[in-house]
């Protein structure tokens, strides 16, 4: 049974050694594999869009396991951060302009 403080933790916690994030079950992110449907649901896109990205060598890194594509959570998190870093918009939540 989880204590009240444990139930408020995020699903990904830093590894006590400080090297790799782990989920609440103790698995490292590079050990967690997601299906195309899992990734599509997370990104809120259709699985066919993800398949098209894979065919065009866009989108998150994946591995072929038989006829299936599988995505490591660590790779997906890295790709998401890259998309955020390259995306438009402003990281300034107050909406202040940088011009004098």
Image (tube, rainbow, N blue to C red):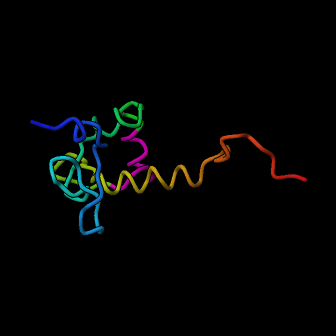
Residue 19: x %, y % from top left = 29, 69
Residue 15 horizontal side relative to residue 56, left or right? left
Residue 5 to residue 54: above or below = above
Would residue 56 be counted in the magenta stretch?
yes
Residue 63: x %, y % from top left = 26, 56
Residue 56 to residue 15: above or below = above
Question: For the point 29% across and 49% down, which residue is it?
Answer: 12
Q: Tell me the quadrant of the picture where the N terminus can be found.
A: top left
Question: Over which residues does the magenta segment extend?
Answer: 50-61
Q: Residue furthest right?
A: 100
Q: How many marks?
A: 0
Q: Which one is in front, 10 or 88?
A: 10
Q: Which one is in front, 37 or 2?
A: 2
Residue 77 to residue 7: above or below = below
Q: Residue furthest left?
A: 1
Residue 18: x %, y % from top left = 30, 67
Question: For the point 30% across and 58% down, which residue is it?
Answer: 14
Question: For the point 50% across and 56% down, which residue is it?
Answer: 82
Residue 94: quarter of image: top right
Q: Which one is in front, 24 or 41?
A: 24
Q: Residue furthest front?
A: 4
Question: For the point 65% across and 41% down, which residue is it?
Answer: 93
Residue 73 horizontal side relative to residue 57, left or right? left
């Amino acid at each position: 049974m989880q204590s009240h403080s444990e139930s408020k933790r995020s699903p990904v916690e830093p590894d006590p050694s400080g090297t790799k994030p782990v989920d609440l079950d103790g698995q490292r992110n590079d050990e967690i594999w997601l299906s195309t449907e899992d990734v599509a649901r997370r990104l809120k896109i259709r699985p066919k869009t993800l398949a098209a990205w894979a065919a065009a060598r866009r989108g998150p890194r994946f591995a072929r396991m038989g006829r299936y594509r599988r995505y490591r959570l660590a790779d997906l998190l890295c790709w998401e951060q890259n998309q955020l870093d390259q995306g438009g918009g402003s990281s300034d939540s107050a909406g202040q302009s940088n011009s004098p």
